[in-house]
Image (cartoon, helix red, strand yellow):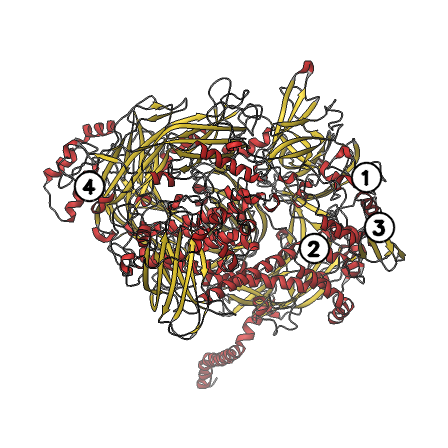
């Protein structure tokens, strides 16, 4: 067969250019020649031909793309022509001319003219004449010219319905599901090969062996494609002679192996995964708070998750408290419940026992948001607080915290906690997920609740009768209301009494920050009840699905739309066992109700005055909406037919069974009453006014029937009751043989099919993508060739699918009932698909062999995006439920989404299971389905379903297997359109099924022995067969062929071929008593051969494949099998020949006897005497075997537990593989020496050539008891032998080592030894960093330091020089700093790489679009990208700073800080000695899976395995010193007992799980090795979760008896026993014997004194000499000039060393050390030697399996006792904090704001005093005296504060110990950043003092004080980051002016004063020598301040102050008054004396 295309001309081209065309069919492109310099017309006149191995389907597509050709750049696409080959298939020959379309699917002028010819042949596929390929098709065949239109008229696809002419304005050919070939050809592959294509069978398979299946989602596995180039070149025939060397075995398996596994491995999940409770641990560390709004507060932080609250301690009078407190919350709930819980962090001001305190602000986020973060955590992020009571205030402060959510099995990598530099930028590190803007606004969320329908009866009928008796009327017995929950708040509507169809018309309003950090709104209908309210149904609205945050996005909006609610079954009982389902936990098993809702969001403008300023939930009425708002109600029709019901569980098999199908409430037998009424009402609303009687009559109709207006259709929703028949001892089946029962239901819904269609198109694209990706993964996994081609093909399919979506989606712009969300979703989906299509194209061009895995990850993201887009948030038609009823009880159900079976005339929009036969597995409802009950299949149905509009009903039977007659209900004979109630099949096919059951591996252990006695049961249709039982194994090789004869299948031949029924394989464990235990189950589909097909390659014989066995949701092993279904009659002889041919093709040595029957047993008779009638898997299918030798190293057994209460005394190990085996020697006395005396034994065995099919190796340990009894101790199955395969050294390679000259290893000889560590310690990071570091140090080694000193003369660099200051901790902290820098550099590099990739993709996108009109919304992700970019830039800049800063750090020698355990870095130290855990006892299930696995371990076997193919080359055994007894295990040490000194160093623990009620623990260390136990109980550390232990412990041990070291951390308790917090176990033996030399880490630098003294008893030269001797290397030879030669490598290094006295001596140690550090570069024996290090080990607690309880930093040294004794242990005891004294002199203040008004004068003044304290020592706060009545804000004090404190230099923390409360037993140590707080206050006598302002100085880095008060400004606080800082610990003495600040009402920082202060830091010794007094006291008193007189207060010196007040202000007034007074006195006197005077005068006296 061949398809030939002749490309004639392309006309109407624009411009002048070179043109080229690409013609693609089935994914195989051919390129035309280049037509040069053509203008208008390009004449190609070229023929393209595809030889094809399977018929062309009418759905397939031919695609021609025309490009402008360019030699330099990528070709530019002019246009594309696609054509469906339907007409070609029918006519055979065709001429077409049509226009091209561009990228946007719009037609362009250019036209193309082609001619197509399709030759079919009736010969079989395998024989082709060579000539047939080369003949030119004859053109005189009668050529039809016809319009493209008829080509495109749609394809009936065996359904007999034409989907109607599609509009052809765009002339888009209908794009059917094209089947792509699996092996995508690379267009650049040489043309020559294409010409050869088609010589012989194999190339045929390569080119086009595709089968078209009807249902695209269960696509055929195209059988093999031959991928190896080998076979391409040598065209081979099966019969031809093959030179065995030219063919690789991989290619043979490729010939016959299916690559795609979608068809043969249906993916069916049995057990519901959601709803099952799991363990979660949430840990929150509250580090500190900053910028809290408020004056002088005492803040407490409250962390609340769900209903659990935990509080930090209270910090007094500070706005930036430091807590560093760790809280842990444990939960055991289902994931949905967990992720909806709200995490709330709030700050409360002055909370104590009596008062609840005032809320400062809160921050809310749901746990799901944290879990979706990378590593499930936020680390060191700032939560922004806002006040829920007052929206206008803005930010109320920040809390810095770590939040992590750990589920079972998650491990959280905590970034290494180094000393925290507190200069973090808050804005850049907000606690927000990526992509959320840092400025969030307040918004209102409106949830509108309109009405509900179809509510279930919530009271039982008894209750109904009681109520009727009391009330006297029959009312609806449900009082519903709706409750809405969002971000921790609840709102509810009013209760509608007694209503099944309540109407509320209310809206619930939430006020929350936008975008919210809570993802879901929970809407629940509840029934109000006197006793307790019950949930009727729950729906979650996911805000991510109803909004889009892109730049063309939209705010959350939804509806008005109906949402469907599902829950428990509708039969109401007083105790509903499935009530959880109604709460939204788990999958609903029945329709409950539907609710009409809408959601809207408006962003608030908080400045406008009329805003409600609280976040309380409100409820308001809303106006009613019209009926039609949600769409026009239409009549839908659902049809279903039960073709088969098998595997019915035997518990229900004895009672009659029927099936019920429901959609919504239609078809439901319980409360079907409310249904017709509703339908009637609805029709009346639509316009026909019907009489009440008719409605009554409707209601009185029987429950499962329903009358239509025309009474033409009665719904049948139940199958007739039937009694099951026995299949086998576990299962029954229903005898639906010829007669298949049917159901049909009419229902009425709003016609919102468009939504479902949209989802369907995307789902189909996603299914196709997923299937393609599975292919690619399978190709990679099975190591086949060219995964990159398949991936390119997948991307090609994806981009065409996306463009197809855009075409289809464009059509549905206008429709009734479309909501805003519909319109916006459509736009955003189209934008997403457009961008996805572009990205797919650009990624496709980047896929190379080496980038396949990375690109695969990117494409997996596409898959998630597609799946997310496809989920429709607004429901329309509810899901369909199929219930199995037994005895009128509902037993088991299946739920089918309505979109999957929805019909559309457009193929892509049709549901994937519409009009198809689908396999449904019924399962138990709700919690019953968890655990073992959920594993059993309740029933397996083969069911056909069709759902569509009633008016489109005519083709509802089109997809059924043909050959049936309809059997209609008798009463309706008159009507033609009545659906059948059953189908009668006359046509049936007879088949034989062959199940080739080869073997299983890694099965679940079902017996107490830790093994199983497995057998497999195969079910097909109503038949079942069993393999034999193999005893005591987890890896049975059955090698058995099960033949099912006379299997009758109904339906059409081609359909059975493309989509045969599913085979179910169940594996059981046979028990002597009782029934067999279920182990697991898997599903498969057989390869089908029809009568007319030839049995031969490429499809047959089938190839063995691995099928994953599931037990619930857990894997329980793998099955290796193959299945074929042969239509009877078939030709035995043909099959036999094909099998032999394949077999002999793979194994050419075997000669086939006469007539080809030589090596194949007859299939029908018994085969050999001992196996009886059991048939083995025939030769062509079973794997080809080769002879292998397996060598086993027996080292020893460890930790064997008791068996049946008896100790194991004389154990032996049995090794078995593929039926052969070997036994170890017997250990005579396990207690004395658990090692074996004979180390190596071997056996030979036949194993498959294909490594992937190797059987497992079983290890069993038995104990030999007296009287010849053996007891099984435990067993282990090594499932993959791959890592033990011996690969011989490549000879050329090996030789190259020997002959090349000496290699200079690049180590700069001038390197100052002191710098050596830079090279080493940066090993872990990227090269770039290394270079920067070394080079800078090199260049500026001298220059820099000098310059620095000149520049900053005043900074003494004491650390740089003073070695005596340095200790082990200096080394440790320097190393951690390095680790952090390395991580930062890594992040920056990653960020840069990401950015580069983004840019590349963007650029490619732009290139692709260069020639088309700008596409709408090409980059919806721009915003996010910018945001990401900014954060990346930040990371980069941080890293950059790190690099710039680095050289200024004082040089400290470093060690390596590993952030995980050493085993993780060095492959468990299994470089030659492996550890195999031995298991016994039944395996645990599911939830407790891991837990049980650890409990089942009964010991460990140490040893190793090596397998290799025989014969082995001679070279190996000829080597010098070869010991034949040791086989492959040369040069391994002996296993005699050995005495070792073990030295354990425990540095510190971090993040321990709290063990006491107060949320803390009192940890201490316990070390256990063998029988020795060291408890460090008396040195427990009080109330610490991050204790620094700093201890070393020495233990003497004897390996192998004592080799498991356990380091535990316990919590000390005063009363009762101490609790274990967590422990870690280290296998010392593997470390000791490892080639990585894990006995004592090698330091970076050799020194003989000081903090870095060499601690290994062996010097580097001795170690090197020993390594060279063991590795048989030549050397070391030390030469002159600091060089050393080992083997053929030359290293160089320093040769001098300084001793304590500074004298230099010659030494070779540095050279030896240089070699050791580069040991991995040594030929053959090289490996990385362990450096000096600290490892971080997780602490685990057996009671909380899988969840880390903290981590422990430690390391272990081991020294053999027979060598020189090591020196004393390094002192790593925690640094004692150094005692310092800080003296602060407050000289003056200035410009302090004036608070008080004067009583008399109303004048502003302040009574100033200054208060100060060191953070954490508030009790020790000190105040100056008061400067009274300052009128200018100036204050003079001359007052001294003295603060003694203990300080840790390395961690920059103050250490203080105090009792937590009066009840505390002992003091707790706190570490607090060194910060000095100074505040200025206004003193008041009778009221509380007023706080005016404060300044906080971080003593390590604070801004320099200003020289004068004028220069001191607010900027010193605002621009703190930019200004240069100083450290008091370096400067010692500082004086200057600093500003006091406070926040005003608007939350702005304002300047409230200035202080002149002097800070002086002294060590305790210095302080003792020069003591000073507090305040102005002796000794060294300060002089009194010169204060103005006003400042003295009136009660001290009243006269003075009065004088001052009055005289100062009123002197003129007083003088005037006095003058006046005198005048008055004079006047008075005058008046007084004048009468007397006058009298005197008058009388003349």
* SS at circle 4: helix
Q: Give 841 or 1714, whichever is nearer the viewer.
A: 841
Kindly tell me whether residue 455 is visible in this rendering.
no
Observer-side mark, 4 or 2, equals 2
Query: Could you say where residue 328 lies in the image, as x and y percent from the top left?
Result: 54, 42
Q: Earlier in the sequence, mark 4 or mark 2?
A: 4
Cα gap from disc 3 to disc 2, whole angstroms = 25 Å
Q: Earlier in the sequence, mark 3 or mark 1?
A: 1
Cα gap from disc 3 to disc 1, whole angstroms = 20 Å
Cα gap from disc 4 to disc 2, whole angstroms = 75 Å
Q: Residue furthest top?
A: 1267
Query: Could you say where residue 1383 lies in the image, as x and y percent from the top left?
Result: 63, 55
Q: Earlier in the sequence, mark 3 or mark 2?
A: 2
Q: In this view, does 1880 lie to the left or right of 673?
A: right
Query: Could you say where residue 1797 lies in the image, as x and y percent from the top left?
Result: 50, 67
Numbered circle sitting on residue 678: 4
Q: Mark 1 points at which residue?
A: 1521
Cα gap from disc 1 to disc 2, whole angstroms = 36 Å
Q: Give 606 or 643, whichever is nearer the viewer.
A: 643
Label 2 crowd bin: few (<14), some (14–19), many (20+), radius 10 Å: some
């Amino acid at each position: 067969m061949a398809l030939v295309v002749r490309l004639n001309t392309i006309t109407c081209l624009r411009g002048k250019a070179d043109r080229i065309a690409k013609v693609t069919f089935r994914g195989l492109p051919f390129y035309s020649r280049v037509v040069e310099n053509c203008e208008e017309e390009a004449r190609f006149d070229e023929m393209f031909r595809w030889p094809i191995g399977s018929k062309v389907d009418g759905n397939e597509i031919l695609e021609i793309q025309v490009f402008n050709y360019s030699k330099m750049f990528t070709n530019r696409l002019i246009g594309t022509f696609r054509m469906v080959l339907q007409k070609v298939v029918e006519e055979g020959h065709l001429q077409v001319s049509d226009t091209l379309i561009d990228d946007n699917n719009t037609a362009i002028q250019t036209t193309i003219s082609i001619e197509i010819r399709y030759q079919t042949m009736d010969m079989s596929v395998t024989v082709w004449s060579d000539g047939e390929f080369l003949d030119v098709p004859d053109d005189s065949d009668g050529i039809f010219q016809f319009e493209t239109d008829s080509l495109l008229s749609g394809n009936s696809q065996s359904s007999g319905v034409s989907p109607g002419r599609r509009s052809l304005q765009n002339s888009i050919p209908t794009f059917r599901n094209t089947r792509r070939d699996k092996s995508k050809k690379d267009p650049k592959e040489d043309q020559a090969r294409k010409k050869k294509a088609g010589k012989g069978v194999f190339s045929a398979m390569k080119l086009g062996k595709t089968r078209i299946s009807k249902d695209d989602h269960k696509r055929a596995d195209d059988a093999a494609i031959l991928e190896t180039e080998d076979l391409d070149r040598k065209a081979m025939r099966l019969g031809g002679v093959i030179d065995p060397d030219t063919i690789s075995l991989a290619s043979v398996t490729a010939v016959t192996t299916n690559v795609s596994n979608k068809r043969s491995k249906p993916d069916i999940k049995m057990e519901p995964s959601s709803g099952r409770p799991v363990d979660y641990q949430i840990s929150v560390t509250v580090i500190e708070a900053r910028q809290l709004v408020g004056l002088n507060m005492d803040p407490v932080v409250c962390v609340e998750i769900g209903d659990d609250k935990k509080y930090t301690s209270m910090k007094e009078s500070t706005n930036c408290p430091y807590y560093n407190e760790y809280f842990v919350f444990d939960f055991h709930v289902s994931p949905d419940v967990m992720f909806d819980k709200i995490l709330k962090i709030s700050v409360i001001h002055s909370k104590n026992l009596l008062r609840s305190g005032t809320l400062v602000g809160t921050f809310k986020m749901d746990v799901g948001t944290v879990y979706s973060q990378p590593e499930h955590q936020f680390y060191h992020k700032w939560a922004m607080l806002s006040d829920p009571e007052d929206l206008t205030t803005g930010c109320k402060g920040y809390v810095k915290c770590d939040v992590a959510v750990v589920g079972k099995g998650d491990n959280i990598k905590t970034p290494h906690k180094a000393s925290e530099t507190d200069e973090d930028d808050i804005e850049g590190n907000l606690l927000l997920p990526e992509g959320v803007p840092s400025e969030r606004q307040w918004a209102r969320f409106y949830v509108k609740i309109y009405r509900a329908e179809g509510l279930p009866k919530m009271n039982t009928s008894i209750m109904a009768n009681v109520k009727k008796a009391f009330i006297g009327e029959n009312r609806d017995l449900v009082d519903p209301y709706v409750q809405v929950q969002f971000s921790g708040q609840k709102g509810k509507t009013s209760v509608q009494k007694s209503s099944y169809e309540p109407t509320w018309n209310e809206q619930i309003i939430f006020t929350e920050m936008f975008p919210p950090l809570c993802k879901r709104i929970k809407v629940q209908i509840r029934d109000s009840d006197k006793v307790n309210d019950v949930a009727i149904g729950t729906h979650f609205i996911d805000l991510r699905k109803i909004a889009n945050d892109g730049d063309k996005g939209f705010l959350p909006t939804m509806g008005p739309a109906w949402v469907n609610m599902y829950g428990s079954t509708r039969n109401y009982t007083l105790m509903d066992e499935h009530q959880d389902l109604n709460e939204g936990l788990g999958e609903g098993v029945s329709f409950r109700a539907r609710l009409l809702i809408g959601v809207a969001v408006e962003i608030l403008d908080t400045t406008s005055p009329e805003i409600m300023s609280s976040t309380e939930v409100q409820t308001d009425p809303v106006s009613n909406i019209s009926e039609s708002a949600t769409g026009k109600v239409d009549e839908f029709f659902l049809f279903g037919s039960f073709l088969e019901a098998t595997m019915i569980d035997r518990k229900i098999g004895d009672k009659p069974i029927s099936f019920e199908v429901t959609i919504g409430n239609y078809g439901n037998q319980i409360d079907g009453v409310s249904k017709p009424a509703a339908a009637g009402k609805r029709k009346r609303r639509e316009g026909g006014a019907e009489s009440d009687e008719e409605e009554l009559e409707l209601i009185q109709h029987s429950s499962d029937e329903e009358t239509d207006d025309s009474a033409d259709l009665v719904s049948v929703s139940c199958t007739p009751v039937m009694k099951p028949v026995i299949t086998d001892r576990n299962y029954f089946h229903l005898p639906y043989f010829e007669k298949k029962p049917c159901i049909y239901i009419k229902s009425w819904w709003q016609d919102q099919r468009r939504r479902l269609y949209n989802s369907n198109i995307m789902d189909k694209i996603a299914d196709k993508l997923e299937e393609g990706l599975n292919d690619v993964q399978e190709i990679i996994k099975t190591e086949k060739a060219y995964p990159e081609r398949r991936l390119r093909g997948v991307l090609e399919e994806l981009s065409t699918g996306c463009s197809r979506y855009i075409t289809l989606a464009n059509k549905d712009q206008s429709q009734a009932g479309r909501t805003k969300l519909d319109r916006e979703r459509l736009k955003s989906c189209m934008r997403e698909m457009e961008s996805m299509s572009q990205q797919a194209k650009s990624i496709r061009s980047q896929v190379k062999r080496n980038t396949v895995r990375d690109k695969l990850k990117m494409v997996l993201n596409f898959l998630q995006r597609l799946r997310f887009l496809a989920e429709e948030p607004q429901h329309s038609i509810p899901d369909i439920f199929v219930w199995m009823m037994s005895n009128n009880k509902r037993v088991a159900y299946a739920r089918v989404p309505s979109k999957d079976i929805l019909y559309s005339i457009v193929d892509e929009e049709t549901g994937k299971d519409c009009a198809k036969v689908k396999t449904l597995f019924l399962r138990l409802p709700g919690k019953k389905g968890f655990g073992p009950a959920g594993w059993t299949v309740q029933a397996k149905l083969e069911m056909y379903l069709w759902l569509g509009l009633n008016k489109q009903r005519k083709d509802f039977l089109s997809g059924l297997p043909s050959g049936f007659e309809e059997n209609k209900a008798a009463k309706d004979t008159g009507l033609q359109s009545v659906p059948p109630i059953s189908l009668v099949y006359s046509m049936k096919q007879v088949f034989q099924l062959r199940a080739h059951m080869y073997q299983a591996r890694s099965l679940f252990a079902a017996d107490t022995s830790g093994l199983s006695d497995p057998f497999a049961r195969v079910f097909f249709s109503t038949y079942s067969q069993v393999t034999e039982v193999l005893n005591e194994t987890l890896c049975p090789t059955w090698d058995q062929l099960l033949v099912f004869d006379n299997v009758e299948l109904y339906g059409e031949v081609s359909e059975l071929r493309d989509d045969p029924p599913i085979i179910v394989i169940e594996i059981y464990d046979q028990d002597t008593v009782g029934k067999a235990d279920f182990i697991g189950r898997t599903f498969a589909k057989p390869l089908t051969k029809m009568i007319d097909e030839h049995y031969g390659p490429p499809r047959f014989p089938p190839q063995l494949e691995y099928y994953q066995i599931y037990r619930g949701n857990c894997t329980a092993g793998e099955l290796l099998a193959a299945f074929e279904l042969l239509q009877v009659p078939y030709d035995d002889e043909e099959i036999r020949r094909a099998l032999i041919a394949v077999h002999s093709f793979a194994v050419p040595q075997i000669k086939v006897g006469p007539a080809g029957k030589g090596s194949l047993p007859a299939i029908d008779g018994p085969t050999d005497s001992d196996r009886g009638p059991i048939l083995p898997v025939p030769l062509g299918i079973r794997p080809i075997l080769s002879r292998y030798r397996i060598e086993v190293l027996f080292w020893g057994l460890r930790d064997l537990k008791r068996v049946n209460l008896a100790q194991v005394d004389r154990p032996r190990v049995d090794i078995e593989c593929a039926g052969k085996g070997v036994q170890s020697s017997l250990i005579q006395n396990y207690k004395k020496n658990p090692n074996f005396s004979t180390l190596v034994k071997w056996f030979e065995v036949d194993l498959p050539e294909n490594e992937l099919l190797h059987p497992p190796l079983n290890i069993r340990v038995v104990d030999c008891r007296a009287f010849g009894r053996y007891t099984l101790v435990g067993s282990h199955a090594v499932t993959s032998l791959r890592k033990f395969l011996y690969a011989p050294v490549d000879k050329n390679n090996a030789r190259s080592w020997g002959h090349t000259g000496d290699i200079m290893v690049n180590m700069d000889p001038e390197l100052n030894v002191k710098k050596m560590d830079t090279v080493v310690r940066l090993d872990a990071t990227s090269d770039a960093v290394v270079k920067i570091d070394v080079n800078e140090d090199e260049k500026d080694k001298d220059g820099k330091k000098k310059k620095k000193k000149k520049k900053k003369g005043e900074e003494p660099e004491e650390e740089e020089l003073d070695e005596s200051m340095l200790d082990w901790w200096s080394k440790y902290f320097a190393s951690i700093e390095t680790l952090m820098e390395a991580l930062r550099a890594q992040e920056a590099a990653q960020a840069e790489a990401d950015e580069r990739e983004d840019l590349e993709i963007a650029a490619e996108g732009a290139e692709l679009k260069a020639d088309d009109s700008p596409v709408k919304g090409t980059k919806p992700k721009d915003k996010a990208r910018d945001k990401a970019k900014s954060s990346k830039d930040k990371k980069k800049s941080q890293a950059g700073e790190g690099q710039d800063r680095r050289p200024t750090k004082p040089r400290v020698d470093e060690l390596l800080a590993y952030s995980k355990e050493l085993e993780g870095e060095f492959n468990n130290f299994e470089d030659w000695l492996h550890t195999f855990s031995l298991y016994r006892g039944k395996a645990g299930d599911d939830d407790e899976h891991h837990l049980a696995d650890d409990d089942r371990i009964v010991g460990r076997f140490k040893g190793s395995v090596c397998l290799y193919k025989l014969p082995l080359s001679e070279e190996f055994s000829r080597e010098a010193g070869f010991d034949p007894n040791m086989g492959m295990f040369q040069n391994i040490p002996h296993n005699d007992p050995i005495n070792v000194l073990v030295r354990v160093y425990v540095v510190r623990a971090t993040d321990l799980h709290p063990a006491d009620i107060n949320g803390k623990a009192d940890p201490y260390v316990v070390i256990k090795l063998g029988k020795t136990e060291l408890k460090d109980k008396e040195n427990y550390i009080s109330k610490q979760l991050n204790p620094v232990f700093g201890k070393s412990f020495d233990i003497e041990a004897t390996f192998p008896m004592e080799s498991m070291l356990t380091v535990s951390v316990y919590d000390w308790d005063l009363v009762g026993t101490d609790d274990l917090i967590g422990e870690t176990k280290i296998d010392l033996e593997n470390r000791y014997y490892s080639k990585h030399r894990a006995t004592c880490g090698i330091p970076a630098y050799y020194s003989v004194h000081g903090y870095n003294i060499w601690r290994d008893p062996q010097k580097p030269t001795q170690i090197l000499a020993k390594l060279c001797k063991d590795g048989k290397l030549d050397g070391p030879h030390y030469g002159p000039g600091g060089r050393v030669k080992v083997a053929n490598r030359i290293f160089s290094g320093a040769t001098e060393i300084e001793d304590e006295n500074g004298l230099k001596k010659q030494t070779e140690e540095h050279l030896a050390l240089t070699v050791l550090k580069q040991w991995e570069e040594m030929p053959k024996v090289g490996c990385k030697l362990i450096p000096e290090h600290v490892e971080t080990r997780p602490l685990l607690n057996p009671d909380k399996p899988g969840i880390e309880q903290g981590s422990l930093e430690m390391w272990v040294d081991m020294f053999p006792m027979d060598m020189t004794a090591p020196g004393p242990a390094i002192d790593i005891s925690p640094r004692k904090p150094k005692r310092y004294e800080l003296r602060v002199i407050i000289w003056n203040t200035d410009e302090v704001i004036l608070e008080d008004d004067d009583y008399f004068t109303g004048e502003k003044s302040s009574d100033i005093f200054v208060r100060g304290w060191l953070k954490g020592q508030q009790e020790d706060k000190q105040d100056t005296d008061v400067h009274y009545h300052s009128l200018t804000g100036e204050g003079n004090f001359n007052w001294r504060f003295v603060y003694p404190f203990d300080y840790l230099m390395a961690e920059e923390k103050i250490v203080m110990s105090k009792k937590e409360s009066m009840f505390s037993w002992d003091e707790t140590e706190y570490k607090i950043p060194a910060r000095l707080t100074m505040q200025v206050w206004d003193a008041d006598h009778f009221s509380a003092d007023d706080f005016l302002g404060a300044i906080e100085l971080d003593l390590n880095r604070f801004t320099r004080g200003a020289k004068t008060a004028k220069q001191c400004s607010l900027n010193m606080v605002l621009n703190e980051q930019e200004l240069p800082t100083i450290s008091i610990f370096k400067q010692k003495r500082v004086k200057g002016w600093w500003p006091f600040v406070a926040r005003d009402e608007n939350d702005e920082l304002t300047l409230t004063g200035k202080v002149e202060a002097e800070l002086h830091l002294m060590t305790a010794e210095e302080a003792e020598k020069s003591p000073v007094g507090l305040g102005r006291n002796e000794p060294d008193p300060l002089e009194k301040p010169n204060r103005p007189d006003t400042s003295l207060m009136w009660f001290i010196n009243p006269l003075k102050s009065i004088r001052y007040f009055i005289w100062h202000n009123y002197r003129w007034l007083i003088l005037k008054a006095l003058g006046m007074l005198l005048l008055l006195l004079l006047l008075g006197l005058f008046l007084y004396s004048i009468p007397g005077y006058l009298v005197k005068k008058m009388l003349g006296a």
